[in-house]
Image: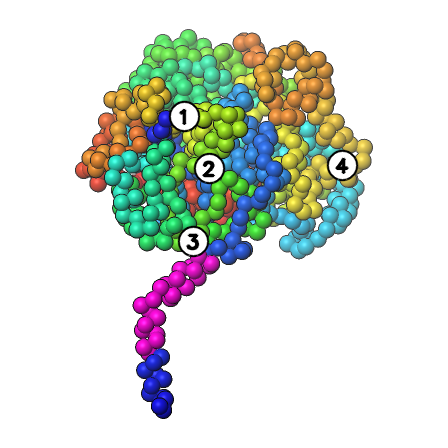
Amino acid sequence: MNARYGMVIDLDRCTGCGACMMACAAENNVPALPQANARKGLTPVLVRRVSNGKQGDGRRETFIPIMCMHCEHDTPCVKVCPQQAVEVDKATGIVMQMPQRCLGCRYCMTACPYHARYFNWWDPAWPPGMEKSLNPGVAVRMRGVVEKCNLCHARLHAAKEKAAAAGKREIDAGDYIPACVEACATDTIHFGNFADENDPVTKEARSPEAFRFLARLGTEPKLYYKSTEAWVRELAEPNAAAELEHV
Amino acid sequence: MKVTRRDLLVWSAGAAAGLLATPVPWKVLDDVSIWSQNWPWIAQPARGPVGVKASFCTLCPKGCGLRVRMAAGYPVGISGSKAHPVTQGALCPLAFAAHQLNWHPQRLRSVRHQSRESSWIDAQNAFAKACKEGSVVVVDGYPGRAASSLLQSFAEKQGGSYRVFATPELRSLAPYESWSGVPASCLGYDLENAKTLLSFGAPLLDGWGTPGRVSRMWAERAAGRHDPDLRLIQIDAELSRTACRAWRWVQIREGSQAAFASGLARALLEQNLVPAHGPVPPITIAEAASQSETSADVIRELARTMVEKSPALVIARDNDPAVAALNVVLGSVGIRGGVVRSSRDPQKHVSADEPIARARAVLIDSTVPWDFAPPTDAEVYRFAAWDGGPNKADWVLPSPGFLEETTDVPTGPAASLESYAIAPAFLKPASDVRSIAQFLADSDRTMSSIPKIIHERCEDIFHRRAGTVYGRETSPLGKFPSVQKLEEELRNGAVWMGQLTPPGNLRCELNEWPSNSNRIAPADRRADWKADWIAPVLPPLASKLYLESTLREAPGRNA
């Protein structure tokens, strides 16, 4: 059975601690270079702090983790890539980025409506000796390529290997959990398979509080968000999104 | 045919133009790009046997449970241990990259004496001389460990004193110590049984207490609910992270917490919401409202809200007696869901901030924040694993880094339950480093050793026959046949948790309402997320939070 992996992010639970960003970077051997900044950095998961624009007692703020939305339909980055370095894996629904094919044109970055893609401006580097702390399951990406969240694909490989070793064709759901999901202390990020009608995330994505950012574009992102606050849900609408205030 | 220079130039130009029409230059350009992307010196992960080990974070006194992924003998990934009964898999953001710290460029690798290179022998000789000439003060930032016992007994033997650098959570319990006589180290907040939490600026969801304890409880009992089982009310001057997610945020003027708390106590008493006993705050509700820039109606209404869902527990950001007295008025001391006494041995500590009258030497453990400078003229010996920048210490002594020494993990600050665990060493120290305990053992051969003290503590726990051990399996302590089995389980990453003591064993008497004389420095909320981090540096990956994004404020000069 083909899977459709995705997430439901409950914004009422996010405290903006940043554990998901740290766990993602550590898991995927994302370098942290002193010359990087908010414009040229690599943050496959980026938590943004936004407000309702009011002041005083009426002010409300929330945190929104933004990452690749793994669009299913007319995936913008796939359509513009001249190198076929991006593809939607039909077996998993994951939008895959292949750095070996990427020529660094950055069309995909321009096409991504969520600004969830990042360019490797510099050679990956760590202080001497620190390369020993890198995750051996993930290859270090080279300078000059685009990268993004791949739902911790190395963990999916590991789960498949484990299933194969046990003589099973399907992986156990508990064996494949992306690093950001595992790291979340408040259970904000729920991961699952939308192809499975009984998966809790499938039901959660249908709740009236669930929404998707820029759903009008029709790209069918597989990242849903949830909030009981109307002003947060309104951020998904195009006009409200334009007024979104970064704190 | 004669070939002229003009012909040569024409052919050369033609060949150059023609070459551009072939794939050759583009292929060469492409290959150069690929070669230069894959220089042999570009870092590649180490290869080798992969495994997972259980341990505990020792980078702050909270002692979170860890699962450390190892490859080729090195830690390559950290995640929270779901088996830990308190943290339940949660960690602070910094812990996820803690395994990078041992290779941090600011790792201390040699002894320094007044900013010049020195040696352990010189340090040892200087310290031996100092011990002969006068008393020694020892400052510890992580009390309750086996190493702490060594430090304490050494200081007492030398006629000096043992002092503790307390976390804000521990400092917030200090008023109850003075009112009840029970040391703050034996007190804790029973958050799990509280129904209303009133936080006076305490960053409950941003680094306060053990990370998973508050965040998991809040996520299960309060997050996203309009009428939650646990009401979190945040009294704060600004919309902090905790205020963002609180059931209710009450904005007050910065520095007016004591006045606001006194006004709330007055409102509770005037509206007969609590039994009238003990002193009445000398401030009126109107005065409290004026000082805190709120309104009297807000204070009265908040007082009613507090008692709607009881028990209500009040938590101060720091040592704030007026805020703590609110718990006494509410009757939230010595009850389930209030301030409780744990089963720990009562140990009263001298604060590190107390003036040092006379001492020949001051030893500061690596668990004390780097910027702590004791008010003394004595010779200062500063142990640290990382260099945090300029320091007034005479001696800077390199100590073991993360997972480089076996240490025990005692009960965290403000915990309601006693706990004990052992964090084993996985790594050989990268350079010639010594812990403060090794240094003292070298100075005094008669002292006990850390393995011996850890064994004694295991024996003590074993003989209590109470509590539960959470490891690969969860078992009551009574099921362990011997101390050795218990110690072995603890060394393999299990944690022992004690039981909640019966209510009523803690009583606080207020003779008069606390004055506002205890001035608390303005809170730096931007630093909450790394307030208890022992290392003076942050893992390089932490820059994702403040340099490559604007999620957090940039740290100070040290990181």
Sequence-wise first label, 3 or 2: 3
* Residue at 37% in and 32% down: A92
Contact? badges 3 and 2 (CB < 8 Å): no
The residue pinned by badge 4 equals B441
Q: Position of residue B248 (x, y in %)?
A: 33, 23
* Residue at 40% in and 60% down: B30
Q: Which mark is residue A143?
A: 3
Sequence-wise first label, 1 or 3: 3
Name the front one of labels 4 and 2.
Answer: 2
State the CA–CA distance, disc 1 to disc 4: 46 Å
Name the front one of labels 4 and 3.
Answer: 3
Which range is magenta? Answer: B13-36
Q: Nearer the viewer, residue B108 or A195?
A: A195
State the CA–CA distance, disc 4 to disc 2: 47 Å
Q: Position of residue B89 (x, y in %)?
A: 50, 26
Residue farthest along the left direction in this orientation: A239
Can you see residue A126? yes
Looking at numbered disc 2 in the image, what kind of residue is underneath it? Ala
